[in-house]
């Protein structure tokens, strides 16, 4: 299989999409964890 520039572009775009998805997912999960900790920790302390 000949690897054309378009092939590399497609692979790079998929990698960028996965990176963006993980960044968004991580920030959302981190925000939820931060909110949960802020809400629940004062009840236990």
Image: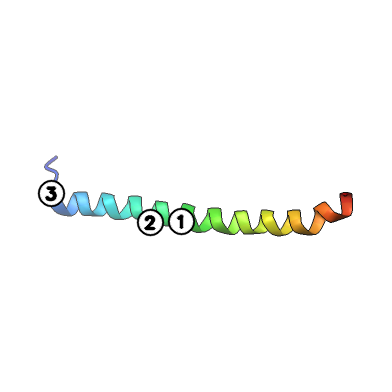
SS label for mark 3 = loop
Q: Looking at the image, which residue sits at the far top?
A: 1
**Mark 1 touches mark 2? (CB < 8 Å):** yes
Nearest-to-viewer mark from 3 and 2: 2
Residue 18 drawn at (x, y percent): 41, 52
Instruction: Name the residue located 74 percent from the left edge and 53 percent from the top edge.
Output: 37
Residue 8 drawn at (x, y percent): 20, 49
**Quadrant in which the N terminus appears:** top left
2 over 29 or under it: above or below: above
Nearest-to-viewer mark from 3 and 1: 1
Residue 26 drawn at (x, y percent): 54, 53
In the picture provided, is 39 more to the left or to the right than 29? right
Comparing 24 with 43, the one in front is 43
Residue tagged 2: 17
Residue tagged 1: 21
For marks 3 and 1, the one nearer the N-term is: 3
SS label for mark 2 = helix
Comparing 16 with 10, the one in front is 16
Q: Residues within 10 Å of mark 2 (few under 14, many from 20)?
A: few
Q: Residues within 10 Å of mark 1 (few under 14, many from 20)?
A: few
Q: Residues within 10 Å of mark 3 (few under 14, many from 20)?
A: few
Residue tagged 3: 4
| Residue 38, label in figure | none
Instruction: Name the residue located 27 percent from the left edge and 49 percent from the top edge.
Output: 11
Residue 38 drawn at (x, y percent): 75, 57
In the picture provided, is 35 more to the left or to the right than 27? right
Instruction: Name the residue located 14 percent from the left edge and 51 percent from the top edge.
Output: 5
Comparing 8 with 30, the one in front is 30
**Mark 3 touches mark 1? (CB < 8 Å):** no
């Amino acid at each position: 299989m000949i690897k054309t520039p378009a092939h590399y572009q497609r692979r790079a775009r998929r990698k960028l999409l996965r990176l963006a998805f993980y960044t968004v997912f991580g920030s959302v999960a981190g925000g939820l964890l931060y909110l949960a900790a802020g809400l629940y920790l004062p009840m236990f302390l």
